[in-house]
Amino acid sequence: MRNCQKTIGNNNFLTRFFISIPAKQNIEHEVDAAVDAVLAKNLTALVDMAKNKSSLALLEGKWKKVSPVPAPDPCTFIPGGPINAAPAVLPCLTASASIQVFGRMFRSGDPPVACNVTPKAYGGDFATGTLYDVVVLTSPAPPSGTCVTVDMDSSGTCGSGMFMTLWSGPFNTTLTNWPSTSPAGAATFQNDPGSSLADPVPMSFTVPPGVSDFSIVLTSTGGLSSCTYGNMTLTYT
């Protein structure tokens, strides 16, 4: 009589066979076949886990569970793009446009206001004889009283060559002059950062009663430009 041992293992599955058998070749073949069947069953379980739950990564000889990276929510994430080109049509935008307008808003240097306070005072017009690139992104507004915060990262190339303003209501994308000299549609000015920053500060406003849309307006600050703005994240509280 002799002991035959064969071991298959990883961190999740360990199968050991301690079998006392006569030293016969055909019995050893049967043990090998049984071990191969267990291995195939365990590999099938691993594949099912990878398909249905999460990915598995082999790290330092051990199986480690790795959580999948979720895709950005199309209703709260707006990817960056050129300030002189039509933005991509996103599922949760009611309108998007790229226009050229004479003049832009004056950068007052005053910091943005917080939610639940009176909207910031409009800073006035600037360089009304100069043509600027303007991107308008209009999104459905959450219920009135909700605080909407727009945060842009620094992945764009515009840096201080771009100025962002927030408006409640749909911004007029057919105008040829900046809003105070040409109607901004149903839009009402809400907030701005006060200055152009390479890493724009988050801006917020409280949705007024009866408002169904709000607009993010991005304006070049040095005339026409081909720079890109950064990715934006919307937060509702």
Image (cartoon, rainbow, N blue to C red):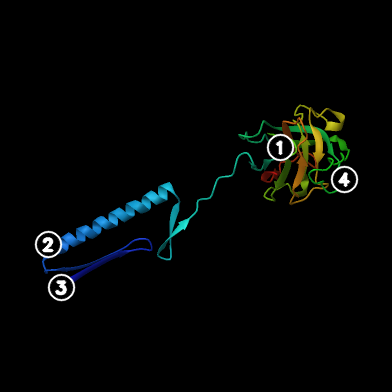
| Contact between labelled residues 2 and 4, with CB atoms less than 8 Å apart | no
The span from disc 1 to disc 2 (Cα, nearest Å) is 77 Å
* Residue 116 in the figure: left or right of residue 154: right
Which comes sooner in the sequence, label 1 or label 3?
3
Q: Please tell me which of labels 1 and 4 falls first in the chain.
A: 1
- Mark pair 3, 2: CA separation: 14 Å
Foreground tag (3 vs 2) = 3
Nearest to viewer (mark 1 / mark 2): 2
Left/right placement of residue 22 relative to residue 16 reads left
CA neighbours of label 2 inside 10 A, class few (<14), some (14 to 19), many (20+): few
Between the residue at mark 3 and the residue at mark 4, the CA separation in whole angstroms equals 91 Å
Mark 3 or 4, closer to the camera: 3
Q: Which residue is mark 4?
A: 108
| Residue under the point 33% across and 51% down | 44
Residue 128: x %, y % from top left = 87, 35
| Helix, strand or loop under label 4 | loop
Q: How dense is the environment of label 1, judged by Cα within 10 Å: few (below 14), some, or many (20 and up)?
A: many
For the C terminus, give its image quadrant. top right
Quadrant location of the N terminus in the rendered image: bottom left
Q: Residue under circle 1?
A: 84
Three-letter code, disc 4:
Ser
**Front position in the image: 83 or 110:** 110
User: For residue 145, which quarter of the picture?
Assistant: top right
Residue type indicated by callout 3: Arg
Q: Secondary structure at mark 3?
A: strand
Question: Label 2, on which residue?
Answer: 26
**Is mark 1 in CB contact (under 8 Å) with mark 3?**
no
The x, y position of residue 19, in whole percent, is 19, 67
**Structural distance between the alpha carbons of marks 4 and 2:** 90 Å
Q: Which kind of residue does numbered mark 1 sit on?
A: Asn
Comes first in the chain, label 4 or label 2: 2
Residue behind mark 3: 2
